[in-house]
Image (tube, rainbow, N blue to C red):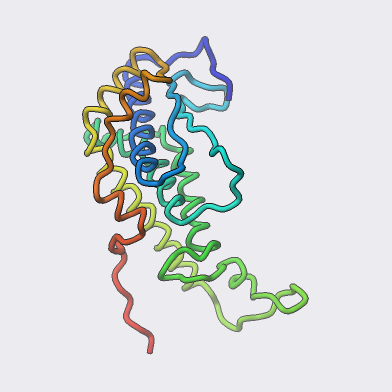
Amino acid sequence: GIEKKTAKLKGSEKAVVARHEAGHAVVGTAVANLLPGQPRVEKLSILPRSGGALGFTYTPPTNEDRYLLFIDELRGRLVTLLGGRAAEEVVYCGRVSTGALDDIRRATDMAYKAVAEYGLNQTIGPLSLATVSGGGMDESGGSVPWGRDQGHLVDLVQREVKALLQSALEVALSVVRANPTVLEGLGAHLEENEKVEGEELQEWLKLVVAPEELTVFIAGKQKSLLPVQAGSG
């Protein structure tokens, strides 16, 4: 959306949104440090926009045409989307706001597709939930009955999606906690100036470090949050 010059945040809202956007920038930069070729954050703003957003973190598209997203990149995007919520949790000791609404929607959609459509979950495997739930497909593209209710599979998908999102949030929290100086310094600077970009922004972001938890998560090597299911024999 377009910046609304006459609408400005004040007081505690301004402080929260500034830390929220700083969180996105810190986590996004840590991810980019681990994944060569990923675009870098170029601009932060806490001027409300016509689309309803109270602030935004601008990362340009990649220079090359891309039609695929690899699993490590998807995991990196999940963590980055939850970086704003993580920053609020850390800075305000768990007192989070409703400002992460769009972030959570987008992260949930991405996690669901990873598990239920793209076959990127080890527990579910290379399976399309939509195809299974619809009865499969015959050679002409029509549906064929599978002969059983797939409710148990839907429940498993939901649990895996929730576990993936929870893992991503925990990792985002680890990244934020590993960069307290950047988070607070950049957040305070953004709160005061309402926009940060160019060399001024990069001077802050070059200080960002990526903790081991992020490396492990992006590689998909972290332990599952779900209990191991016994084999059905």
Q: Residue furthest bottom?
A: 233
Q: Quadrant of residue 11?
A: top left
Viewer-closest of 59 and 12: 59
Measuring from the top left, give residue 120's x and y in whole percent.
Answer: 47, 63
Measuring from the top left, give residue 59's x and y in whole percent.
Answer: 48, 32
Q: Residue furthest top?
A: 6
Q: Residue at x 35, y 50 (%)?
A: 168
Examine the rendered structure and indicate whether residue 232 appears above or below residue 72: below
Viewer-closest of 39 and 154: 39
Q: Residue at x 42, y 54 (%)?
A: 72
Q: Quadrant of residue 42?
A: top left
Examine the rendered structure and indicate whether residue 182 appears above or below residue 77: above
Quadrant of the snapshot with the N terminus: top right
Q: Is residue 62 left or right of residue 82?
A: right
Q: Residue at x 33, y 40 (%)?
A: 30
Measuring from the top left, give residue 107's x and y in whole percent.
Answer: 46, 47
Measuring from the top left, give residue 36's x and y in whole percent.
Answer: 42, 44
Q: Is residue 11 left or right of residue 109?
A: left
Examine the rendered structure and indicate whether residue 15 appears above or below residue 92: above
Quadrant of the snapshot with the C terminus: bottom left
Viewer-closest of 101 and 64: 64
Q: What is the total number of numbered labels drawn onto the structure image?
A: 0
Q: Residue at x 44, y 21 (%)?
A: 45
Examine the rendered structure and indicate whether residue 212 appears above or below residue 101: below
